[in-house]
Amino acid sequence: MFSAITITIYLAAWAFLLHTTVRRETMRTERLLAFIAFGNLFHFIAAYHSILSDSGYQFGFFKVPSLFFAVINLVVLLSSIRKPLHNLFLFLLPLSVLSLLLASMDLQTRTSQPLALATISHILLSLLAYSLLTIASLQALLLAYQNYQLKHKHLRGVMGLLPPLQTMETLLFELVWAGEILLTLSIITGFLFTYSFAEQHVSHKAVFSVLSWLIYAMLLWGRHTLGWRGAAAIRWTLGGFAALMLAYFGSKLVLEIILDRV
């Protein structure tokens, strides 16, 4: 029921946002964000019931994305109060609906484990880091689109709704900085409390997480010392995001879907 309510709200908000964007109509952003926030509340409830089982919590391959996008939407909602991020919901709302549908169709029961406080802190830090860096990757895609349109002198349509290029780049690096700090804390808590290299899938997760951290660190170093921007910033941001997604979803895809082990 909660999933159905959330999907209805998200689709209505997405249709309204798409309509106003295409027609370049003015809108009350505050009302749109309040409507999405209402749906986001139901999204968290739906995600919670999806991963909750009688024996504990099940973080399955098709269940985690729903919680993942609930957190992302919350971060974008809060950030949109001061930053021009609401257009990201053109991407996020359809993906959120897809994640809810996948979670509702995943009826497989997997081994549940009780969660210690240290593990919970690691999960929360990871979710926040993944959320911010996902938003950064979407921002990078918007920046790539903006660069392409400016290069080909297409200044109408969606271009008129986006902030200036310099503002978009500044926002991108703010997101990467915040995400990198949280990713650092996530990796530290992972090594201290949860990673066991005797488990092969955990070692793969740790390796790709560290690889992602290194890519983002190189991006921030290049920005600070070499003045990286534009295409270089976009490539490194998306490269770091790809490694980060492989860290979690790659091992889960192999184990749960291909090998059906966990």
Image: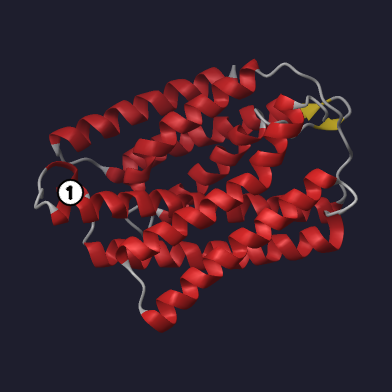
Count of numbered tags: 1
Residue 125 seen by the camera: no
Q: Give the amino acid type for the residue marked by disc 1 in the picture.
A: Met
Picture quadrant of residue 250 = top right
Which quadrant holds the C terminus? Answer: top right
Query: Does residue 222 sit above or below 47 in this rendering?
Result: below
Query: What residue is drawn where x is 10% and y is 50%?
Result: 155
The location of residue 33, given as percent across then percent down, is: 38, 42
User: Nearest the camera: 57 or 258?
Assistant: 258
Using the image as rendered, state which of residue 36 and residue 62 is in the foreground: 62
Q: Residue at x 57, y 44 (%)?
A: 71
Instruction: Give above or below for 37 relative to 187.
Output: above
Is residue 237 at all visible to an observer of this figure?
A: yes
Would you place residue 24 above or below residue 102 in this image? below
Q: Is residue 215 left or right of residue 202?
A: left
In front: 164, or 83? 164
152 left or right of 13 in image: left
Q: Secondary structure at mark 1?
A: helix
Residue 5 placed where, x, y %? 51, 21
Residue for badge 1: 159
Percent of width and height locating residue 185: 69, 65
Quadrant of the rendered structure where residue 260 is? top right
Compared to residue 92, the image places residue 244 above or below, namely below
Side (left or right) of 66 relative to 200: left
